[in-house]
Amino acid sequence: MNRYHQRCCRSPGWSAFIADTVLPRALDGITLGPHVLELGPGYGASTRPLVARAKSLTALESDPQLAARLRAQLRSVRVVDGDATDMAFAAGSFSAVVCFTMLHHLPCPSAQDRLFAEAARVLRPGGVFAGTDSQPSLRFRLVHLGDTCTPVDPGTLPGRLAAAGFTRVTVEADRRLVRFAAYAPGAGGDSSA
């Protein structure tokens, strides 16, 4: 991330937007169950409010410095260094997998598809994969100058999630966010196991 982007992502304003707008919208009507995995938490703007929603929260972060920072700040969260496109977790480890405004940080759609397949693999039957990504705008493009930036197309996202093995896929988009929820097959959609 460029320096301006880093400053934005660790700002109190961004944290408030994530806690007050993004998470409530992304998780409205969704039961996460007891074992939640967050992908790409970055500076932890979404991780902090997730702590109150999950009995057990694991955060998977690819940047070792950000992972160490989160580990020091959020002792109740298990922070793991790793790649969301190739996770070291066993199949069926989590009741929910979530990610917020991070998918566009992957280098290409095929990397996003690998993340989707990995999320499906590590979910328990009936577990939910939910989250958001940002919609492109002039401000969004300016913040990402010189950064990896691969926006998710909300029109193709349902098919991509289904191809990864998910059922009951929903995708909603407005001018700022794409919201999605999709379920691992089995267990009648119950993710509380």
Image (cartoon, rainbow, N blue to C red):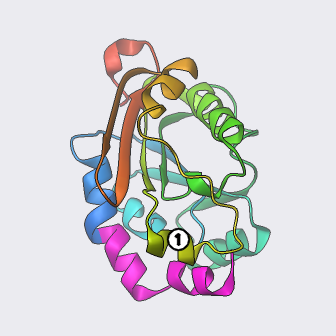
Q: Answer above or below: position of 170 versus 134.
A: above
Residue 4 forms part of the magenta stretch: yes
**Residue 57, how many percent across, how many down?**
50, 53
120 displayed left or right of 25: right
**Residue 179, how many percent across, how many down?**
35, 46
Q: Main secondary structure of the magenta part?
A: helix
**Residue 21, how many percent across, how many down?**
27, 65
Residue type pointed to by label 1: Gly
Which sits in the foreground, 23 or 171? Answer: 171
Q: Which residues are magenta?
A: 1-19
139 displayed left or right of 7: left
Packing grade of label 1 (10 A; few <14, some 14-19, many >=20) is many
Say which residue appears at 47% left-offset and 33% top-offset.
Answer: 157
Which sits in the foreground, 81 or 5? Answer: 5
What is the quadrant of the N terminus in the image? bottom right
Residue 11 forms part of the magenta stretch: yes
Q: Which residue is mark 1?
A: 44
Q: Answer above or below: position of 168 versus 181.
A: above
Q: Answer above or below: position of 4 versus 69.
A: below
Say which residue appears at 46% left-offset and 60% top-offset.
Answer: 136
Say which quarter of the image contains residue 141. Answer: bottom right
2 displayed left or right of 123: right
